[in-house]
Image: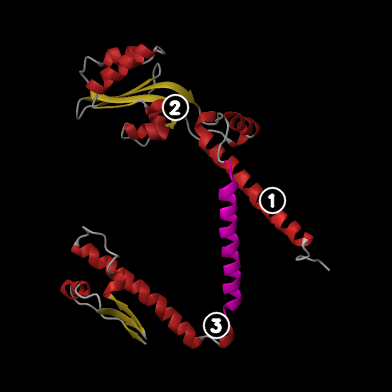
Amino acid sequence: MVALPVFSSCKAISSLFDDDRKVVAKVGQHKLSHSDIAALVPKGTSHEDSMKIVMQYINSWASDLVYADIAEAQLSKQEKDVSREVEEYRKALLKYRYEQRYVNERLDTSVTREELQEYYDSHKQKFVADMPLVKAHFMRISADSPSIEPIKKNITSDNIDDMAYVDSLAYSSADRYTDYGGKWISMKALARDFGQEDWSGLLSKMRNSFIQVRDTDYDKLDIAYISDFVRAGDPLPLEYCEAEIRGILIGIRRHELVTGLEQDLLEDARAKGKFVIY
């Protein structure tokens, strides 16, 4: 039943690409030609990787057909009758596509600050930090840089001019400087800046809102200034979970639209005599 060519060398496999009409594999009466696989391999892919992609596709193609052929031969007529399942799947697919179009035409995806705040206040128990969160500035800088102290002195200021001075000095002096745009990040994410996994150990080194670690191999200092902090177990800041809440609210609206659609269609069908319960 199966006639799948076995290629013993890359040279033989490479012949697959020579002729669009060439049959490269066969399962029963099913044939796979070069034109069927021509678009599989992205331009620039190495010869070895190209062969892997092609052979994986051929094996997958053959496997599906082998299963189908053996099932066709071995299953009874009743077992092979999938018309009911096909029809159920067709109806489910049509229902899904219509719901998607209906929702996409009507769904309001704008969420106000008031709506976010209201949901957050009503569900605070859902939004609890499982690890510390911080607002931070991070820089990696030479340990003997004269810019370290001016940066550390001014970075604690709320004055816009002071922060502009810090940014200018840090960007010109530090090997790397990140202010995270004033967003909340997890201590785990900040620890990665230090090249560490032990965020709790790193946090224990915080003194006067600074975490400082010296890299003696390269004579560098990794410094983080923590401008704000949320302990594990404390409520998450609204701005940290804003995207999640927005998704929840839009999901609720979507569900309400679909539920309303179903009710409206049933009522309309009853009104027109199309749906009758005896």
Distance of label 1 from label 3 (alpha carbons): 38 Å
Q: Identity of the amino acid at label 2?
A: Val
To which quarter of the image does residue 41 belong?
bottom left
Q: Identity of the amino acid at label 1?
A: Gly
Q: Where does residue 165 sit, x and y in percent of width and height?
A: 30, 14
Disc nearer the start of the sequence (1/3): 3
* Residue 67 sits above or below residue 51 on the image: below
Q: Secondary structure at mark 2?
A: strand
Q: Residue at x 32, y 82 (%)?
A: 26
The answer to whether residue 269 is left or right of residue 151 is right
Q: For this rendering, which residue is in front, 95 or 182?
A: 95
Would you name the residue on which mark 2 appears?
Answer: 134
Would you name the residue on which mark 3 appears?
Answer: 80
Q: Where does residue 60 sit, x and y in percent of width and height?
A: 36, 72
Q: For this rendering, which residue is in front, 217 or 8?
A: 8
Camera-side mark, 3 or 2: 3
Disc nearer the start of the sequence (2/1): 2
Q: Identity of the amino acid at label 3?
A: Lys
CB-based contact (under 8 Å), mark 1 and mark 3: no
The answer to whether residue 61 is left or right of residue 132 is left
Q: Range of the magenta residues?
A: 82-108
Dot 1 crowding, Cα within 10 Å, few <14, some 14–19, many 20+: few
The answer to whether residue 40 is left or right of residue 120 is left
Q: Secondary structure at mark 3?
A: helix
Q: Where does residue 75 sit, x and y in percent of width and height?
A: 52, 85
Q: Residue at x 38, y 31 (%)?
A: 190
CB-based contact (under 8 Å), mark 3 and mark 2: no
Q: Residue at x 61, y 76 (%)?
A: 84
> Of the numbered discs in the image, which one, if any, rests on residue 260?
1
